[in-house]
């Protein structure tokens, strides 16, 4: 029955919003590279001295680079079976900070990568607590972030996976320290970013890793002509090639941060123990009570 409802929702939404179906969000074109822990500092210093410059040329483009450091707190959501992690879908609520100040909150829905594992679609939902749903949905750990006007878009995206917004539950929470270089062309328009993310899981045993993202500007890439996209892709490929030559231990890993963290957590005995610590505690109390009871009976 739920599958039939999802199909009907998808059909009705598509029929009434057909102009949004072709491109529901922005296209992401990015390379994700794993960084060995002992090379993080050296890599970032190289990026600063090579690309965070007032003027440099690359791929026949005159460019400039500007640095930024930010912090992100990300809550990832999934269904109860963790199907998003398996399908490389990311659904997260993000809080973005700079110098300790909250800059923005939003929900991001990222679809699986294309066959070349480089391009994916991203749909963004603005978060505004004063314009929330205003009913019992405010108590839902996921729906509370949404305005009523965004619910149809959300239902449409989830219906493709045979899910309803009410089916979504919290999964993992991450903290990221993000060091980034914004690359602009000679007209001052953004072209690409080079991002070094140091990621840690919020819960014990606090699994952590670092990754490098080489990403083209989403808005510009989405709206570009085929020729412009080819030029932007050439730039990204060249940066990837230069960095890989300088740091040969960098490894392409296009898995989402959510997928990476879920694997680390699911395969960790310590995470399992932490998640089930309440049950272990009650089990220990039960064993102790049983022991004391038997001891009293024997005496």
Image (cartoon, rainbow, N blue to C red):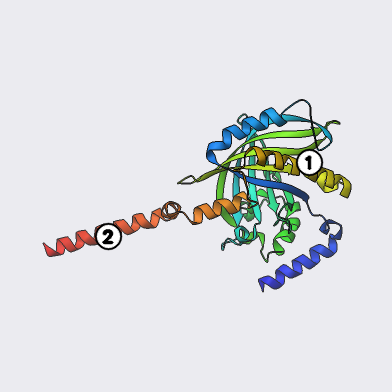
Q: Nearer the viewer, residue 269 or 212?
A: 212
Distance between the Cα atoms at labels 1 and 2?
64 Å
- Residue 123 position, x and y percent, is 74, 51
- Residue 97 position, x and y percent, is 63, 35
- Classed neighbour count for the residue bearing mark 2: other residues with Cα under 10 Å, few (<14), some (14–19), many (≥20): few
Residue 146 vs 292, above or below: the answer is above
Q: Nearer the viewer, residue 123 or 29?
A: 29
- Residue 240 position, x and y percent, is 70, 42
Question: At numbered mark 1, what does the secondary structure look like: helix, strand or loop?
Answer: helix
**Image quadrant where residue 213 sits:** top right
- Image point 74% across, 30% down: which residue? 65
**Image quadrant where residue 117 sits:** bottom right
The circle drawn on residue 286 is none
Which residue does the numbered mark 1 point to in the structure image? 235
Which residue does the numbered mark 2 point to in the structure image? 287
Q: Nearer the viewer, residue 111 or 194?
A: 194
């Amino acid at each position: 029955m739920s599958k039939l409802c999802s199909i009907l929702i998808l059909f009705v939404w598509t029929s009434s919003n057909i102009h949004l179906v072709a491109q529901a969000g922005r296209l992401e074109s990015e390379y994700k590279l794993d960084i060995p822990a002992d090379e993080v500092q050296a890599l970032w210093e190289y990026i600063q001295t090579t690309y965070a410059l007032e003027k440099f040329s690359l791929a026949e483009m005159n460019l400039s680079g500007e640095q930024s450091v930010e912090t992100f707190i990300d809550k990832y959501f999934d269904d109860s079976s963790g199907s998003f992690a398996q399908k490389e879908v990311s659904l997260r609520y993000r809080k973005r900070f700079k110098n300790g100040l909250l800059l923005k909150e939003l929900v991001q829905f990222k679809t699986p990568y294309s066959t070349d594992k480089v391009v994916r679609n991203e749909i963004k939902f603005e978060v505004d607590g004063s314009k929330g749903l205003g009913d019992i949905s405010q108590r839902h750990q996921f729906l509370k972030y949404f305005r009523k006007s965004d619910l149809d878009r959300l239902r449409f995206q989830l219906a493709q996976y045979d899910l309803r917004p009410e089916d979504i539950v919290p999964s993992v929470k991450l903290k990221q320290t993000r060091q980034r270089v914004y690359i602009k062309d000679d007209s001052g328009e953004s072209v690409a970013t080079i991002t070094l993310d140091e990621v840690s899981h919020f819960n014990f045993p606090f699994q952590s890793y670092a990754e490098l993202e080489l990403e083209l500007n989403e808005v510009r890439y989405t709206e570009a002509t085929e020729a412009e996209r080819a030029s932007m892709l050439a730039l990204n490929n060249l940066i990837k090639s230069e960095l890989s030559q300088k740091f040969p231990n960098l490894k392409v890993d296009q898995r989402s941060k959510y997928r990476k963290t879920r694997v680390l957590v699911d395969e960790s005995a310590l995470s399992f123990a932490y998640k089930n610590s309440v049950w272990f505690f009650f089990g220990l109390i039960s064993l102790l009570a049983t022991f004391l009871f038997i001891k009293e009976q024997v005496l």
